[in-house]
Image (cartoon, rainbow, N blue to C red):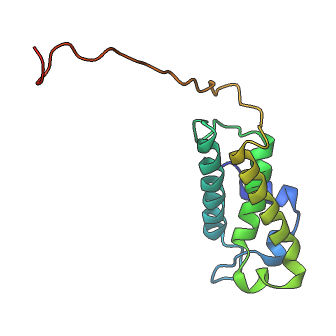
Amino acid sequence: MTYATQADIEARYPGELAQAGPRDGAGDLDAVAIGRALVVADSLVDMTLRTIGWAVPLADPAPDWVVEIAVDLALYTATPTALASQDDFADRGKRFDAALERLRAIARGDILPPRPADQAAVTTVYTSSKPRVFGRGAL
């Protein structure tokens, strides 16, 4: 399960994949390349959520803010390099950078997203004990 799908990208940014998305040998949109970009986006989101103590991957359906970030990351990642460097597609780069900054802010604790209902809060448990009475150096 990925947090976002090709349909999510199309819904959020209609026509952008058709305009400048990865192509296969027949000239059609390359669903495999788009799938890889979605997996990259998922791993970036998961790394961030893991740093704040969340169990990943998140249960389906993912929160809207996760889908939003994943879409921005995946769309830019799926854009062919030759096109991504053109001024016409600079907005994709800006959205990608903004999504990465949002993930960094979450990791720093500047933004604390609402925890999904299936995520239990992480509790730290401290233990202590007395020194050993019996051991190699003492009877």
Against 127, is 43 above or below? below
Answer yes or no: is residue 7 visible: no
Most foreground residue, 127 or 91: 127
Most foreground residue, 124 or 2: 124
Image location of residue 85, percent across then percent down? 78, 84
Q: How many labels were placed on the picture? A: 0
Image location of residue 83, percent across then percent down? 78, 83
The residue lying at 77 percent from left, 37 percent from top is 113
Quick one: which residue is furthest to the front in this view? 138
Answer yes or no: is residue 122 visible: yes
Q: Is residue 131 left or right of residue 103?
A: left
The residue lying at 82 percent from left, 60 percent from top is 98
Image location of residue 105, percent across then percent down? 76, 49
* Rendered-image quadrant of the C terminus: top left
The residue lying at 60 percent from left, 64 percent from top is 36
Image location of residue 132, percent across then percent down? 23, 16
Which quadrant would residue 121 be assigned to in this image?
Answer: top right
Which quadrant would residue 5 be assigned to in this image?
Answer: bottom right
Which quadrant would residue 31 be assigned to in this image?
Answer: bottom right
Q: Is residue 88 left or right of residue 132?
A: right
